[in-house]
Each structure stands twice: as structure tokens, then as C-alpha cells.
Image (tube, helix red, strand yellow):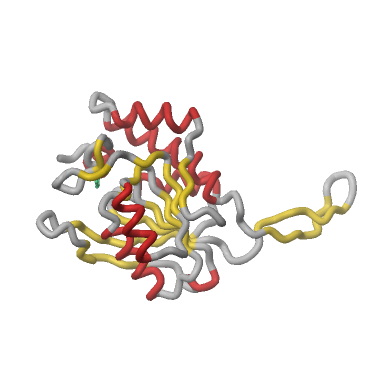
């Protein structure tokens, strides 16, 4: 991708996002809307995937048909909220390999702490799409991308639902090579590191926890 930051301001995305933000939206609707928006964001983030051609036979005649080039891509969920975006991407790219990075945010320092890491093999040969709905301080996202690079990834894109300017700056400083695709950039963070106006805790809202 050529753009370092893509904000997908498509009317369907914005409408669905507004419903997600509303605190009266149910857990079931929140989950479904995240799924639907992720499909639309996935369409954008895969727009410039490298292509090649392959000879096929249509019922009418042979043709050199365009197909995706390279190894199957790797989709990496940053736990736990990233899981809510997995199926939306997999709907479009069912053959993607899937990995998980477990990081939790220390509520005092706001720094990420790793507790799980499992990713597909040959990351160096794959496009890696890391997913996490909320790019807030950017600390967890930058740490997850650090881990993916340590595991060999060289071609990473970051897909989120909402981003704060602070998180974008942090990611672009730590990983200027990683394009970010988001549905919206909000005003900023509050003292607890939550995105404002945001939508609250994405994990809690999609899993019905508190
Ligand atoms: N994580 C969330 O789920 N929400 C925020 O606003 C910030 C981080």
C-alpha cells in the first residue's frame, strides 16, 4: 500500500460505526456491525495486493486469468478484541493463515505485557494483516508489530476500526513501513487511555463483559 494512513469514510462504514458507538447498542449488534465493517475495511486494505496470472479454461476458451500472487496471507489478531475482526477478513480471504498475539495493557503504566504468541510459518514470505479494533496509545499495536517483525515479517499492514491521533503518531514513529487502515480518527485519548469520543472498551462491548 502506498498511503501510510487510509481512513475509509464510506457512508456504509460511517453509518454502521455510529451505531456501534451508541452505548445503547446490544452486544449482538455490536459484534455483527464490527464483522460487517471489517469486511468493508478488508476490501480496502487488500486493494493493492500483488497479482499474477494463471491459465484456466472457461467453458468457452482458455484464458490467462488474474489471480493473487505469492503465499497465502497471514491475518494476526491482537487479542482479545482483534478476534472480533477475524471473521470479517476471513469472509473475503478464507485461505488466509491466522495468528494470535496476546498483549494486555497494564492499567497503570498503559504499557503492553505479552502473554501469548502463535503465528503461521514463513511470515517473511507473507503479507501480514494485524487486526485490533482500537488504535489508542499505540503501545500494544507497536509492540505487536515488533513481535511480528522479530518473527520474520517484513510486509505488515495494520487494520483497525477507530484510531486516536496519539496512536497513529506512535505507530508511524515506531513502524513507518506499516500502513494503517481505519474507519475513523477520533479526537484523542482521555487520562485512562480510552479513545474519545470512541465507543468504550471494544472487547467488553463485543463479548458482553465488564
Ligand atoms: N481499547 C478500547 O477497547 N477502547 C479504547 O477506547 C481504548 C483502548
Q: Is 198 in front, or is 207?
A: 198
User: Which residue shows up at 44% across the image and 75% down it?
Assistant: 152
Residue lying furthest left in this view?
108
Number of labelled discs? Answer: 0
User: Which residue shows up at 46% across the image and 70% down it?
Assistant: 153
Residue 100 location (% of width, % of height): 35, 61
Residue 112 location (% of width, % of height): 22, 62
User: Which residue shows up at 28% across the image and 52% down it?
Assistant: 80
Q: Is residue 152 above or below residue 89?
A: below
Q: Is 46 in front, or is 75?
A: 46
What is the quadrant of residue 104 in the picture? bottom left
Figure quadrant of the N terminus: bottom right
Residue 72 location (% of width, % of height): 56, 62
Q: Is residue 29 above or below residue 207?
A: above
Q: Is 112 in front, or is 151?
A: 112
- Lateral position of residue 104 relative to residue 47, left or right: left
Residue lying furthest right in this view?
61
Residue lying furthest top in this view?
24
- Lateral position of residue 152 relative to residue 53, left or right: left
- Lateral position of residue 9 relative to residue 58, left or right: left
Q: Is 161 in front, or is 85?
A: 161
Figure quadrant of the C terminus: top left
Q: Is residue 58 above or below residue 12?
A: below
Residue 81 location (% of width, % of height): 30, 48
User: Which residue shows up at 34% across the image and 56% down it?
Assistant: 169
Location of ligand 1 given as a quarter of the image: top left
Amino acid at each position: 500500500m502506498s498511503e501510510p494512513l487510509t481512513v475509509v469514510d464510506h457512508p456504509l462504514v460511517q453509518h454502521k460505526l455510529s451505531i456501534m458507538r451508541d452505548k445503547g447498542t446490544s452486544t449482538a449488534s455490536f459484534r455483527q456491525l464490527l464483522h460487517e465493517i471489517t469486511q468493508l475495511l478488508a476490501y480496502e486494505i487488500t486493494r493493492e495486493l500483488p497479482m499474477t496470472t494463471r491459465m484456466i479454461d472457461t467453458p468457452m476458451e482458455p484464458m490467462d486469468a488474474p489471480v493473487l500472487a505469492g503465499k497465502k496471507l497471514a491475518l494476526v489478531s491482537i487479542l482479545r478484541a482483534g478476534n472480533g475482526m477475524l471473521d470479517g477478513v476471513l469472509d473475503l480471504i478464507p485461505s488466509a493463515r491466522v495468528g494470535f498475539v496476546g498483549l494486555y495493557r497494564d492499567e497503570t503504566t498503559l504499557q503492553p505485557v505479552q502473554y501469548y504468541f502463535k503465528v503461521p510459518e514463513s511470515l517473511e514470505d507473507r503479507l501480514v494483516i494485524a487486526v485490533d479494533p482500537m488504535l489508542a496509545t499505540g503501545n500494544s499495536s507497536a509492540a505487536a508489530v515488533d513481535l511480528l517483525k522479530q518473527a520474520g515479517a517484513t510486509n505488515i499492514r495494520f487494520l483497525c476500526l477507530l484510531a486516536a491521533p496519539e496512536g497513529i503518531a506512535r505507530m508511524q514513529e515506531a513502524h513507518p513501513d506499516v500502513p494503517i487502515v481505519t474507519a475513523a480518527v477520533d479526537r484523542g485519548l482521555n487520562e485512562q487511555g480510552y479513545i474519545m469520543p470512541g465507543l468504550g472498551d471494544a472487547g467488553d462491548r463485543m463479548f458482553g463483559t465488564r
